Image (spheres, helix red, strand yellow):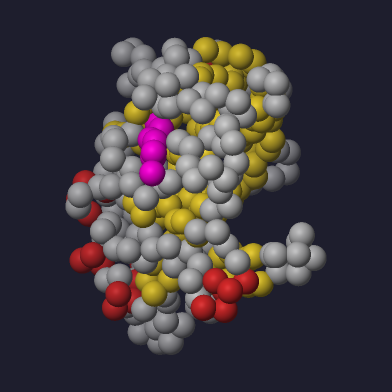
C-alpha cells in the first residue's frame, strides 16, 4: 500500500498491507498497513531493533534528497521506511504467517533486512479486537545499524512444513530464504541464504546459511543469483526444496542461457545438498523491445502429493 504522502507514488514509498476473508473470499476486511506504529515508537536510533514500522506524516516531506525544498518541511522518516515483497502462508494448526522485506531509510541507502509476523488462529473476533498480526520478528537479527547497513537482502520466500497430522498441536519447521549481498563494497557479491525456525517463527536463532555455489575466485564480481523459491515436502517433516535463477553464467557465455539451480535438505535445513543446474532458460531478453524495464524470469516451484517436484518460471518486470 502506497503511503499517504502526496509524493509517495513518484518516490516509490509504501508498506505492506493485508486483507482477511472468512467466507471463502467473497468479502474482505482491509487491515491496513502491517504493524505500523507512531513514529515515536520506532525512531531511527531504534533501528534495526524496532518492533514495528513507523507510520508516515503527510504534513511533512520525507528525509531524502528529493525532499529538499519541499514547502511542507522535511523530517518524516516514516514516509521513507519501506516494507515490501510479502509472502503469506498458514500452518496446519490454522495459524497465519507473513514475511516481508524490511527497509529502514539508512543513510547508505542499503540495509534491507527480513522480518516475520504471526497471527494465531485468525478469526473475525481478532479483527474486532485488533488482535491480528504480531509485532515485527527479525529473521536475520542484525545487532546494530552499522552492521545491517552493509547488507542488501532481497527477493524473500518462506515455507512451513505441514507434513503429518493436522491439528496435533505442533507447527512444523519454517524455512525462510532470500538473496543476500554479503559484500556491497566489491561488486555486490550475492548468495542465496536460508534460516530456519522450530518454534512457529517466534525466534530465528541461527545465522543465514548459504545454499548457492560459492564465489568463483577468478570472478570477483559474482555470483549473481536471485529469485529463490523454497517449498516444503508434503510427507517428510524435514525435507525442503529450493530453486533460484543464476544470471551470471549466461552473461559470461555471451548468451541468455540463464540456468536454474536446485537443492534440497532432508534434515530440516540444518544442511543442504550441493546445488545443481536443472534447466537453462533460453532466449529471454534482459530488456524487452521498446521498454525500459528489466526482465527477470524468477522461478516458482511446487511439491506434489506423492513426492514429485515441478519447477517452472514466471516473469518479473520492474522499473530499473
Q: Is residue 39 above or below residue 176?
A: below
Where 139 falls versus 127 (above or below)?
above
Percent from the top left, x then y, of residue 69? 37, 80
The residue closer to the viewer here, 118 or 32, is: 118
In the visual, does 53 lie left or right of 89?
A: left
Whether residue 196 is in magenta: the answer is yes
Residue drawn where x is 53% and y is 62% of the image = 16
- Specify whether 74 is left or right of 275: left
Residue 288 visible in the picture = yes
Viewer-side residue, 173 vs 153? 173
Q: Which stretch appears magenta? A: 193-199
Residue 70 in sight in this render? no
Q: Residue at 70% x, 65% y: name it.
A: 22
Position of residue 173 measured from the top left corner of the image (x, y, whole percent): 45, 36
Looking at the image, which residue is at 41% across and 33% down? 194
Residue 180, located in which quarter of the rendered image?
Answer: top left
Does 269 appear above or below 99? above
Report the residue at 33% width, 12% height from top: 218
Q: Left of 284 or right of it: where is 71?
A: left
Residue 212 vs residue 234, the one in the foreground: 234
Principal secondary structure, stretch drawn in magenta? strand
Amino acid at each position: 500500500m502506497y503511503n499517504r504522502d502526496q509524493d509517495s507514488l513518484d518516490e516509490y514509498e509504501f508498506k505492506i498491507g493485508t486483507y482477511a476473508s472468512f467466507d471463502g473470499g467473497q468479502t474482505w476486511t482491509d487491515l491496513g498497513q502491517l504493524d505500523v506504529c507512531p513514529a515515536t515508537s520506532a525512531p531511527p536510533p531504534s533501528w534495526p531493533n524496532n518492533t514495528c514500522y513507523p507510520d508516515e506524516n503527510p504534513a511533512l516531506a520525507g528525509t531524502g534528497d528529493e525532499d529538499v525544498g519541499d514547502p511542507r518541511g522535511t523530517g518524516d522518516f516514516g514516509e521513507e521506511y519501506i516494507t515490501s515483497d510479502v509472502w503469506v502462508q498458514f500452518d496446519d494448526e490454522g495459524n497465519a504467517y507473513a514475511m516481508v522485506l524490511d527497509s529502514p531509510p539508512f543513510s547508505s541507502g542499503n540495509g534491507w533486512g527480513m522480518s516475520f509476523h504471526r497471527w494465531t488462529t485468525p478469526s473475525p473476533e481478532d479483527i474486532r479486537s485488533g488482535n491480528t498480526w504480531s509485532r515485527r520478528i527479525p529473521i536475520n537479527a542484525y545487532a546494530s545499524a552499522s552492521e545491517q547497513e552493509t547488507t542488501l537482502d532481497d527477493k524473500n520466500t518462506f515455507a512451513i512444513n505441514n507434513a503429518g497430522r493436522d491439528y496435533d498441536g505442533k507447527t512444523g519447521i519454517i524455512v525462510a530464504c532470500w538473496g543476500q549481498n554479503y559484500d556491497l563494497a566489491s561488486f555486490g557479491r550475492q548468495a542465496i541464504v536460508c534460516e530456519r525456525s522450530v518454534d512457529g517463527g517466534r525466534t530465528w536463532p541461527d545465522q543465514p546459511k548459504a545454499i548457492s555455489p560459492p564465489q568463483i575466485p577468478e570472478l570477483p564480481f559474482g555470483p549473481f543469483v536471485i529469485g529463490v523459491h523454497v517449498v516444503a515436502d508434503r510427507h517428510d517433516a524435514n525435507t525442503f526444496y529450493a530453486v533460484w535463477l543464476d544470471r551470471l553464467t549466461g552473461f559470461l557465455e555471451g548468451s541468455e542461457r540463464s540456468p536454474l539451480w536446485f537443492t534440497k535438505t532432508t534434515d530440516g535445513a540444518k544442511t543442504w545438498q550441493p546445488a545443481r543446474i536443472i534447466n537453462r532458460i533460453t532466449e529471454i531478453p534482459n530488456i524487452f523491445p521498446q521498454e525500459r524495464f528489466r526482465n527477470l524470469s524468477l522461478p516458482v516451484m511446487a511439491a506434489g502429493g506423492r513426492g514429485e517436484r515441478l519447477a517452472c518460471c514466471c516473469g518479473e518486470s520492474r522499473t530499473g
